[in-house]
Image (cartoon, rainbow, N blue to C red):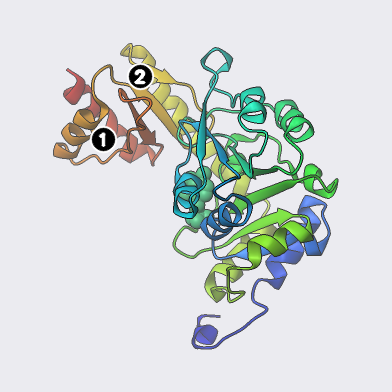
Amino acid sequence: MVDFGGRYRYSEGDKVQQLLSEQEGVKLSYVRIYAGSSGPLHQAVLAFTSPDRPFVTADPGYEAGERAAKFIGAKVIRVPLLKDRKYAHDVKGMAAASANAGLIYLCNPNNPTGTVTPQSEIEWLVANKPKGTIVMIDEAYTHISGEPFNSHLVAADKDVVILRTFSKIYGMAGLRAGAAIARPDLLEKIQSFSSTMMPITGMAAASASLQAKYVVPERRKAIGNVREDVFSFLGKHNFTFIPSVSNCFMIDVKQPGGEIIRAMQQEKVFIGRVWPSWPTHVRVTVGTQEEMDKFKTAFLKVMA
Ligand code: PLP
């Protein structure tokens, strides 16, 4: 496969497109393949928001879409997660945020909290959003959580764009493969900025991944085991954290998070970042058991 890398090959994503369309129960023309999901994420924001069509997102949430919205001059409306509902998205608040919203972005489970929004609430949002608003559901971490996917909304021709990536559970962040699943008229708007040329190694690995049925359950279990082990450690030491079903979670360190991040770096453990609305929480990614054992040792030292 790598031997073909020196050439332009236009149909490299075809097999991945066919497999995804079969597995998701949508027509072939409803699936478009990309080199990762960042491309369609940014492009959808550029396509559907504008200076008079706001971008609605969760707070804290994944920031990429927000950056694209700012770039194009669209207003960004951040709707806080629901603390009393296990940090689910506030779908009612998001639907009501702007009668003229261009795009509502919902990541399930959410990055950075790893918390879930029930499918019934996602369906409520799609049914009750303002007319003409697109709902983009980012399913980057859905495989890890075991939560249901939402392709049925696309199959039913709703105003929904679903994002998928092979960067997370499939471990292909550097190989690059992803997809947008949506009605062809929506895909056409998203597509208008990008090339169809796909990385051949990424496409070969993506179709192999979709066919190897053991990969998702095996890795979900492996990540879950390490995550639950860290959670029992945090609980035992009375740290405050938000239970997650993903490969990342937030700890409330009860002091400026940036200072803990820097102190951890001194211990050669590099954790994630802080969100401005939650200044005392740090994001931690679930690594291997060995990495998390190092994390535990360093965290106890730093917090002492
Ligand atoms: N969506 C979410 C929620 C993410 O966390 C990321 C990466 O961190 C992406 C999309 C983009 O990933 P990629 O471009 O590797 O598919």
Q: Quadrant of residue 139?
A: top right
Under mark 2, the amino acid is: Leu
> Which of the 4 image quadrants contains residue 229?
top left
Q: Name the residue located 30 percent from the left edge and 33 percent from the top edge.
A: 293
Residue 45 on image: x %, y %: 57, 52
**Residue 231 in the image, given as x and y percentages of width and height:** 42, 22
Residue furthest to the left: 266
Mark 2 — residue? 234
Q: Which mark is residue 294?
A: 1
Question: Label 2 CB, ligand 1: below 8 Å?
Answer: no
Q: With 272 as the anchor, is 263 left or right in this view? A: left
Query: Mark 2, residues whose alpha carbon is within 10 Å: few (<14), some, or many (≥20)?
Result: some
Could you say which is closer to the camera, residue 286 or residue 260? 260
The vertical placement of 118 against 142, above or below, is: above
For image coordinates 43% across by 30% down, the residue present is 249
Q: Is mark 1 within 8 Å of ligand 1?
A: no
Q: Is residue 52 visible?
A: yes
In the rendered view, tell whether residue 114 sits above or below residue 152.
above
Quarter of the image with the N terminus in it:
bottom right
